[in-house]
Image (cartoon, grey):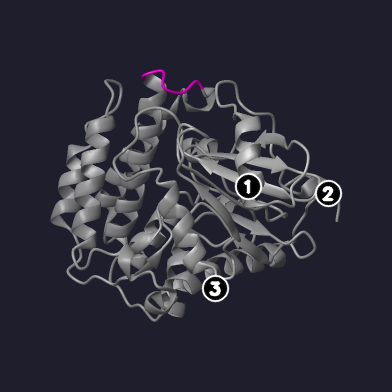
Amino acid sequence: MSSEVLDKAKAVRSGEELPVETVDAWLKKQDDTLTGQPQVTQYSGGASNWTYCLEYPEKSLILRRAPRGTKAKGAHDMGREYRLQKALKPVYSYVPEMVALCDDPSVLESEFYVMEKLTGIIPRKNMPKGLKLSTAQTKQLCTNVLDCLIELHSVDVEAAGLNHLGKGSGYTQRQIDGWCERYAKAKTWNVPSGKKVMHWLQQNMPSDERICLTHNDFRFDNVILSENEPTKVIGVLDWELATLGDPLMDLGNSLAYWVEADDDFMAQNTRRQPTHLPGMFSRRQVIDYYCKKMAIDIESFTFYEVYGLFRLAGIVQQIYYRYHHKQTRNPAFKNFWLFSHYLLWRCNKAIKNQGK
């Protein structure tokens, strides 16, 4: 298969440059096989943490660091993300190998970590040019990606040594309280208050709560596919939000990004993964497939749908808040306030249509 379909980083964005010599010197202390100066490029997909590719003659590495500007409490914790992946790798093969963690502010003003680069295909908004999947292959890709989420939700947390990630019962309440607070703090003058949705979520929390290892940002553009077998997943990325939580809330998070072929203009305009292709499941089919394989029986998915959409509104608004207050100059964030409006409208629509 042509190398053109492989995911590649681009030029580093203005204002987000790395102190290459300083980082290079530190990295060579961690890995003495590295020689020369790295060629540094940056991935454009991340709207949260900044992700760079460091290409040395011997190998290519990935560096992840927090962005500059206002950060939500507990967000962008590179040390946590590094340690979680290091512990998870032996029991979940899709995690990249961790190389090193740096918490020395003299190297970079923020904590960062370096990991192996998994070379492959990332299914972003559209599949790469030159890669054409049949309807049957697309369906296989869809089920393979969902199976990776199901496998994650089935990990033995105790065996992986990840019990410390959880805070015990009350996960659902903590999530609802937390996202209501984050949205309120990030609200700008040009977006709705969201109070109606917040109140509904508070009043409609399920009484039963399942707890497992959750990713909380599980999307097609956070998986890496094999270059030679493009329906096969070889890696899962972006573990910043992973925790011990409710698997159906994790699925709701994923479905907030799931745009179908006949969804409205706004959904299509903000689509960031190829879930519109012939062969992809609908959101309803995803829920049915997941619940059947996980042996979960629920009467209604509305709470989890609304939670996922509202949480995404909170994430979008936090990003827009940084742009609004000139803490980032990334032009991709300029119109995120419109997306906040749209997601809250979707929440209200789902609430109105529940049971139909």
Amino acid carrying label 3: it is Pro
- 9 or 55, which lies in front? 55
Q: Is residue 244 visible?
A: yes
Amino acid carrying label 2: it is Ser
Mark 3 or mark 2: name the one nearer the start of the chain. 2
Residue identified by numbered label 2: 3
Relative to residue 125, is residue 70 drawn left or right? left
Amino acid carrying label 1: it is Lys
Query: Which span of residues is magenta-colored?
Result: 325-329
Above or below, 68 against 175 in this view is: above
Prevailing SS of the magenta stretch: loop
Disc 1 secondary structure class: helix
Q: Position of residue 59 (x, y in %)?
A: 75, 51
CA distance for labels 1 and 2:
32 Å
* Residue 183 located within the stretch drawn in magenta: no
CA distance for labels 3 and 2:
30 Å
User: Badge 3 local density, few (<14 within 10 Å), some, or many (20+)?
Assistant: few
Q: Quadrant of the N terminus?
A: bottom right
Residue identified by numbered label 1: 29
Relative to residue 291, is residue 26 drawn left or right? right
Above or below, 270 against 204 in this view is: above
Q: Residue placed at 40% from the left, 58% from the top?
A: 242
- 310 or 61, which lies in front? 61
- 211 or 68, which lies in front? 68
Q: Residue placed at 18% from the left, 57% from the top?
A: 173
- 182 or 312, which lies in front? 182
Q: Quadrant of the C terminus?
A: bottom left
